[in-house]
Image (cartoon, coloured by chain):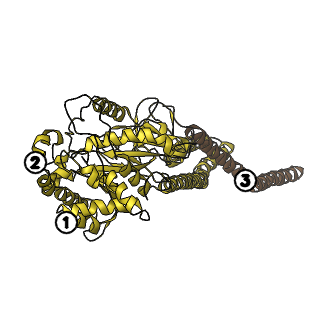
Amino acid sequence: MLQLIIACLGLILILWIVYMIGLLVYHAAPYLLSAAAIYGAGIALRNYGLAFANNIKPRRPAP
Amino acid sequence: MSSMQEPAVKSYFFGKGYRDLQATIAESWSRNLVSARQELAAAGRLWSGTYLAKGGAILRATAGLSVILFGTAFFLIFSTLHVAVLLAFFLLIYLGFTVVYLIERGYLAWRKLSTVCPECHEKSALPEYFCPGCGEIHRRLIPSQYGILHHTCSKCGAKLPATFFLQRGKLQARCPNPDCGYLLKAGHVESRKIFVPIFGGPSVGKSAYLFAAVQDLAIEAPRLGFGPFFVDAHSEGEFERARQELGRGRPPAKTLASLPRAFNLELRRAGGQGSRVLYLYDPAGEAFGETEGLILHKYQGYLSGLIFLIDPFTIPAVQLEYQDRLPGAREALKPSALPAEDALARIFISLEEHFGQSKTARLKLPVAVVINKVDAFNLEDRIGERAVRTRAAANPTTDPDTLRDELIQSQLVRWDQGDLVQQLEARCTRVRYYTCSSLGRMPDTTARAFAGRGVLEPLLWILGAADGRFFQGGGRA
């Protein structure tokens, strides 16, 4: 009987952990995805900045 | 503001700015693609791993897609901003050089400053300038996309003033006519000018008149408040040669060039009150022998006045009057072979057919009709200044200039030149009659110096009539 109780409690614990992980993933995923998107945006911004710095030369070329 | 390629560095906002923008967009896209590929490749590698790795793969893929998405957004936003900034500066500079250019053109037009080539007679708004550093030709040295106030030579980097107000005229210039290219002096460029040709048939004494008038002008100029200066070495050398010849009692050599080079003299008012550059023309008399002879004389398109020289010994009535003495003096007098009426008719035809003069309109420019060679026989007593003084003494209330006009006119009519007088009076609004002796005496075998008489008055009258404010008090009104 005790073993059955322990097994049930274990199952409940596992389900609870899975639930909690699911809950965590459910709540954290948008943030994670947002962070990934911001990371991508940062790369795009850095790329434009580097391209700008490399190509915009308003000074007149030396003859 | 033509699109002709100038050897100058174009303003950043008129070309390179847009090329830079294009290169920026291309490079940022290429970088974005590389970054996205890196992220997606990393995602692909992680996908085959654990669940956690799979989560990481999703995040890396998201980052890759984000690079493309935000790359596009940034490209659109920043490019729009970039173009807006470029266009703002473009418009600002365009406005700047247009305003400076219009002010300059307006000022030049108001002050009647122009560029005229003394060699080919091309009148132009702008000569071609040489770069003082490398000698490269700048054809459009004006406020433009190459610079509002200065142009930078693309060959040597020298800064050239692009406007009249910054002493552009001090640069060495040349005639913009591709068939000419004559090196212009400062006086030929952006200065106020007066154009006076001396017209008349062959051997009427045009060259002697020109040099005698210039010599007298040089002597009289200080009294009139001017300082005379030669604009170029050519005119100075020509004058010096003629002065020496006249000083030795030799008439100037016959003009051979049908299309004359202008003789230039700059007259500067004392006290820095401006200057005028005289363009005097002495075409060969043969140019008046046929109607087509004057086509190339482009200066007829912008004349300030005209001196029409008459040799009285071309007139049959005069030849008849002096038939007893003329054969002995023929060699010295060298009577012109072309009747004055024919020469005048060809001048009018030339002006009408090639220089926009209407056949019915009257010439507005002052015309001085000058009877030369009055030193011969007793012409001075009949129509010269002595005769005018005698008349003036008898008519003290009448203006001597009017008396002179009447005297010469009536004598021309008596010499059967009524048609000539009628033509002059009918076709010209301002005509004055003068007599002169461009040599001062009959040529002979002696080396006695020639000294012209009465040569300056017609020129001064033309100058006064053409530009009264500058030459006030210089001649008859």
Element type where label 2 sits in the image: loop
Residue at the outermost bottom position: B360
In terms of depth relative to the viewer, which is nearer, B337 or B409? B409
Indicate the quadrant where residue B43 lies: top right
Nearer mark to the viewer, of 3 and 1: 1
Colour used to depict chain A in the structure image: brown
Q: Looking at the rendering, in which quadrant would you find the C terminus of chain B?
A: bottom left
* Residue B111 locus on image (x, y percent): 50, 53
Name which residue lies at 19% across and 30% down.
Answer: B445
Question: Which numbered disc covers residue B71?
Answer: none
Image check: B16 left or right of B217? right
Q: Which disc number belongs to residue B324?
A: 2
Q: Foreground: B190 or B373?
A: B373
Residue receiving disc 1: B419
Q: Residue at x 38, y 35 (%)?
A: B232
Q: Position of residue B64 (x, y in %)?
A: 60, 47
